Image (cartoon, rainbow, N blue to C red):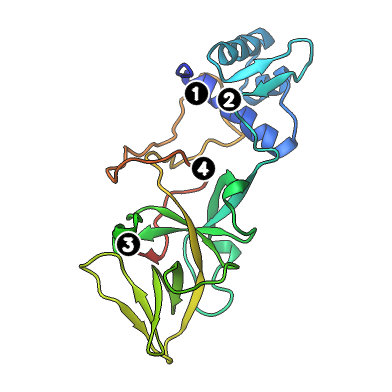
Amino acid sequence: MSEQLTELEQRVYHYMIDFLAANTYQPSIRDIARQFHIKSTKTVSDLLHALERKGYIERDESRSRGVRLLGFSGGGQTQPIPYYGRIHAGTPSLLPEDRKGFITIDRRFLPTNDTFFLRVKGDSMTGRGILDGDFVMISPSLVHKDGDIIAARLGEEATIKTLAHRDGRVLLEPANENDATLEVSSSDDFSVLGVVCGVYRPFWEQLEQQTLTNGPMNGPSHAAINGPSTNGPSTNGPSTHGPSTHGPLGG
């Protein structure tokens, strides 16, 4: 298990991850010194030695950018998936201005390249392991069928339910005995947004993300952190980016 980082070490480590993602190469010692207003390159070198000793990076000191982030494979095997804060009636239901950020995940878990995330609000699908506050990953391109968990739009409201057809009727079934099945009539402004293909449940969430314009090395960090979730155990999941706000997806 990696050793706990100090506040400054964590900020430098996150800066290195963000810099690599944006530039495809690592920052130099002078880049880091400039970013954090550190006057001495030896101070930066000491920070990198600490990150190496604690198991976060490997260094090749014969090269100016000879740093490898251990466990980081974002260059080739991951993809940022957009997270939307609301939907709209009609087409398109998802607009760029409503994109709240991204959740980066391993591409092995993407059934299609047009997937997106919405956040669940409500507890109508607890019987299928989807809880209030979860992020659900949705694929518009997968062909939906009875029994699939889908994200559906009714007017400007979204809901997540199990799809069913009976006697020519479209039914949206909850997985909570306290909620009623929704029956979709021909006059309803209804569409299927996509098939739910994944659920992400963070226990912690950084509300104010550190950017690449951090202040001086002795300045305080003001990132707010939510307390742990009470929704049960979480599996390892992707990183979240963007503000924390419940989306329109009624559970």
Kind of residue indicated by mark 2? Tyr
- Which callout, 2 or 3, points at the residue further toward the start of the chain? 2
- Which callout, 4 or 1, points at the residue further toward the start of the chain? 1
- Which callout, 3 or 1, points at the residue further toward the start of the chain? 3
Q: Indicate which label's residue lies in the foreground, 4 or 1.
A: 4
Q: CA distance from mark 4 to mark 1?
A: 29 Å
Residue 205: x percent and y percent? 41, 41
Residue 29: x percent and y percent? 71, 17
Task: State whether residue 249 is above or below residue 110.
Answer: below
Residue of label 1: 219
Residue 180: x percent and y percent? 25, 75
The label shown at residue 69 is: none
Residue 30: x percent and y percent? 72, 19
Q: CA distance from mark 2 to mark 1?
A: 16 Å
The label shown at residue 238 is: 4
Q: CA distance from mark 4 to mark 2?
A: 17 Å
Kind of residue indicated by mark 3? Met
The residue tagged with tag 1: helix, strand or loop? loop
Mark 3 and mark 1 in contact? Answer it, CB < 8 Å.
no
Q: Image check: 119 left or right of 181?
A: right
Residue of label 2: 13
The picture quadrant where one finds residue 163 is: bottom left
Dot 1 surroundings within 10 Å: few (below 14), some, or many (20 or more)?
few
Kind of residue indicated by mark 1? Gly
Task: Kindly identify the residue that appears in the image at 66 percent across and 19 percent down.
Answer: 33
Residue of label 3: 125
The residue tagged with tag 4: helix, strand or loop? loop
- Which callout, 4 or 2, points at the residue further toward the start of the chain? 2
Dot 2 surroundings within 10 Å: few (below 14), some, or many (20 or more)?
some
